[in-house]
Image (tube, rainbow, N blue to C red):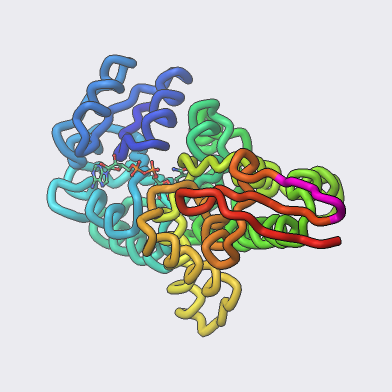
Amino acid sequence: MKVGFIGLGIMGKPMAKNLLKAGYQVCVNDFHKEAVEELVVAGATAGANNAEVAKGVDVVITMVPNSPNVRAALLGENGVAEGADKDTVVIDMSSIDPVESKKIAAELKERTGMEMLDCPVSGGEPKAIDGTLSIMCGGKKEVFDKYTDLLKAMGSSVVYVGEIGSGNVAKLANQMVVAANIGICAEAMTFAKKMGTDPELVYQAIRGGLAGSTVMDAKVPMMLAGNYKPGFRIDLHIKDLNNALNASHAINMPVPMTAHMMEVMQELKNHDEGSCDHDDIIRYYERMTGVSIVKEKSFFIDLRGKCYEYRFYQGRYRSYYYSY
Ligand code: NAD
């Protein structure tokens, strides 16, 4: 099977490499020519533009940032629609607004007769490299059945969710849960610290109970270590929450928790932290309370029933007093 692959960023590059490893013939394109070169060295061919990538292939995969990028790659100048055969199928694996996904699929069908699936992913760069992404799929079931094996070369969980747009509905639901979950983990750990209790021990005490989650285990240790290296950038999470707000408002559904997390993330962006990992939400709480949970940045001194905590905050140690 011949595959066209458009978008060789953090996620697309390892995904395309996994297709090569699985024996597929892959033709690639990206604006970043170093990424294209890297794939050519790994065994791919390169198209001069997206129309060329789509020529003579069975399926074209797109892995670009957002809805306007998908629209440009498929329907824009020198886009897939200009080069593809009507039997070529498009699998968009980007995380985009499901309403836009439906519109793009309908326009593609009307212009070219081509079918489209929306199959966004969860798992981030490490799982893209391992080929163990979770892939959520929308579109015609018979088209999905035909390309399940191809998707399994990039993911360990491939689930059919429903008609076109459903894959992105599942992805947005995922992003809503993750945002709120990180937010409450940050809030609870800051609460523990401000109460004078070690947040790391609180985390150890609660992670095996009902409050425990994959998010808690992935993000609380990062917060305790003061590690904000992405991972998943705040800017991309803002993009996803924006899509979730647009999609829910299109059906007149209020999403108050999602809206709240969007505003928290806007505060982070306002502090030039858009490129940080989304565990950076802890710094919103740090600014609000003056308390940092970062381990190395604070120490306690106990003097006859009076506890002083010294915290490194905004460039210097400050002392805080607790009596008990
Ligand atoms: P990225 O910004 O690293 O890569 C996107 C690539 O697409 C860029 O290299 C860009 O040059 C290319 N591109 C954009 N428009 C193009 C066009 N018209 N033609 C050719 N190339 C084009 O983004 P990423 O982190 O790889 O994310 C891609 C998608 O996957 C996003 O929708 C994101 O939300 C989603 N996602 C990302 C992660 C993650 O951890 N990074 C996890 C799950 C899902």
Quarter of the displayed picture in which ligand 1 can be seen: top left
Vertical relation: 222 (above or below) 239: above
Residue toward you, 304 or 227: 304
Residue at 48 percent across and 71 percent down: it is 263
- Location of the N terminus by quadrant is top left
- Residue 169 lies within the magenta run: no
User: In the rendered view, does 153 fall on the left or right side of 79?
Assistant: right
From where the camera sits, is residue 146 visible? no
> Horizontal and vertical percent for residue 88?
33, 42
Which stretch did the figure color magenta? 300-305
* Main secondary structure of the magenta stretch: strand
The image quarter in which residue 255 lies: bottom right
Residue at 27 percent across and 28 percent down: it is 35
> Horizontal and vertical percent for residue 193?
72, 56
- Residue 304 lies within the magenta run: yes
User: In the rendered view, does 65 fall on the left or right side of 192?
Assistant: left
Residue toward you, 227 or 162: 227
Residue toward you, 128 or 142: 128
